[in-house]
């Protein structure tokens, strides 16, 4: 008998996001697409934004067919503030308002830092950090000036607070987004604007992981071995969490960062966690050696 995986099922009740207008940057592929699809299935009017209009149009069509709700594709380079303002205006013109912003647009390189050019740093920082604060500032000004409440959800990563070698531009950018989340959660709460973040662990997306770990590297660096639950995340799991955090059900959650990684970062953080690699039979030998050492110490006292 196969165990039913309830975590792959939708979580919120039908029409839980009805009446909301949600903008998702980087919404054409990967986790952005998964979140956008679920938001639309829950009744939201969704706009997806990125630089690749063809990809956006394809995704918007697919989601609309499945959910029965219109999805608006808007071409936008989030690193360009004028582009962001134009995208915001297009969404308001189409749907009449904006309630939620999901800063999901991202990029990454896996490389020794000394091999990177300053241009490589610029590319990642401009998409993730500059894009994140461009959208947050533009949408925040709109909500404050129009006296509307708003919700921002930032997609960060667990190494936003620990840092990580070999992905330094991303770590720098995500750490900045983490600071932005916590700072504006306090400053803009008086305007009815909430900021929260999700820090995902491994959630494989075909395109992104192939670019980061080409060829057989994906098999050599099996992320399931780094996760205590011994599996990677399902996209619906993250979509469920995202939907909750942008919904009215989470109205008292503000300035929070929710980790969803199966315990991965904690396993890496614990000083003795590498002992997980010791075979079970070897623990008998270790225990015997420890007892013998204790007996010797007691005899000397």
Image (spheres, grey):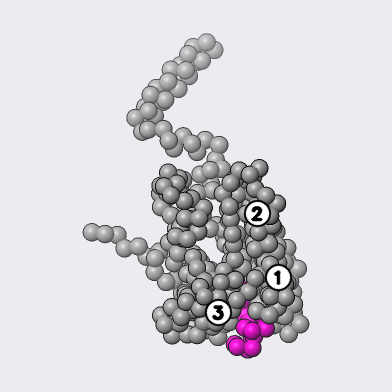
Q: Position of residue 56 (x, y in %)?
A: 52, 75
- Nearer to the camera, 270 or 293: 270
Q: Looking at the image, tell me whether mark 2 or mark 3 is earlier in sequence order.
A: 3
Q: Describe the element under mark 2 as helix, strand or loop.
A: helix
Q: Position of residue 103 (x, y in %)?
A: 61, 68
- For image coordinates 68% across by 67% down, the residue present is 79
Mark 1 sits on what residue? 80
- Residue 292 vs 144, above or below: the answer is above
- Nearer to the camera, 111 or 135: 111
Distance between the alpha carbons at the discs numbered 1 and 2: 17 Å
Q: Are marks 1 and 2 in contact (CB under 8 Å)?
A: no
Distance between the alpha carbons at the discs numbered 3 and 1: 18 Å
- For image coordinates 39% across by 65% down, the residue present is 8
Q: Residues within 10 Å of mark 3 (few under 14, many from 20)?
A: many
Choose top left, top right, bottom left or bottom right for residue 53. Answer: bottom right
Q: Looking at the image, tell me whether mark 3 or mark 1 is earlier in sequence order.
A: 3
- Nearer to the camera, 146 or 89: 89
Verify whether residue 106 appears in magenta: no
The residue segment tinted magenta is 88-102
User: Which of labels 2 and 3 is toward the front?
Assistant: 2
- For image coordinates 57% across by 58% down, the residue present is 199
Q: Is residue 200 visible?
A: yes
Mark 2 sits on what residue? 120
Q: Which mark is residue 236?
A: none
- Residue 243 vs 201, above or below: the answer is below
Q: Describe the element under mark 1 as helix, strand or loop.
A: loop
Mark 3 sits on what residue? 73
Distance between the alpha carbons at the discs numbered 2 and 3: 27 Å
Residue at the extreme top: 300
Q: Looking at the image, tell me whether mark 1 or mark 2 is earlier in sequence order.
A: 1
């Amino acid at each position: 008998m196969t165990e039913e995986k309830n975590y792959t099922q939708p979580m919120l009740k039908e029409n839980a996001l009805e009446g909301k207008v949600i903008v998702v940057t980087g919404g054409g592929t990967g986790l952005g697409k998964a979140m956008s699809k679920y938001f639309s299935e829950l009744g939201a009017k969704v706009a997806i934004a990125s630089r690749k209009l063809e990809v956006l149009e394809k995704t918007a069509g697919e989601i609309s067919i499945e959910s029965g709700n219109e999805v608006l594709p808007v071409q936008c380079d989030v690193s360009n503030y004028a582009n962001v303002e134009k995208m915001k205006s297009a969404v308001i013109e189409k749907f009449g308002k904006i309630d939620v912003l999901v800063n999901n647009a991202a990029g990454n390189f896996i490389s020794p830092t000394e091999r990177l050019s300053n241009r490589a740093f610029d590319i990642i920082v401009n998409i993730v950090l500059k894009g994140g604060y461009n959208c947050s500032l533009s949408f925040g000004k709109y909500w404050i000036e129009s006296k509307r409440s708003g919700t921002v959800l930032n997609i960060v990563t667990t190494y936003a607070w620990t840092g990580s070698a070999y992905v330094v531009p991303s770590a720098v950018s995500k750490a900045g987004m983490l600071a932005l989340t916590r700072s504006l959660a306090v400053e803009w709460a008086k305007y009815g604007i909430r900021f929260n973040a999700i820090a995902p662990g491994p959630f494989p997306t075909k395109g992104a992981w192939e670019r980061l770990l080409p060829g057989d590297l994906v098999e050599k660096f099996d992320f399931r071995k780094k996760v205590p639950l011994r599996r990677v995340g399902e996209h619906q799991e993250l979509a469920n969490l995202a939907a909750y955090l942008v919904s009215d059900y989470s109205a008292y959650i503000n300035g929070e960062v929710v980790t969803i990684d199966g315990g991965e970062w904690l396993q890496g953080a614990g000083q003795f966690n590498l002992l997980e690699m010791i075979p079970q039979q070897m623990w008998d030998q270790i225990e015997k050696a420890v007892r013998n050492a204790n007996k010797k110490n007691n005899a000397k006292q």
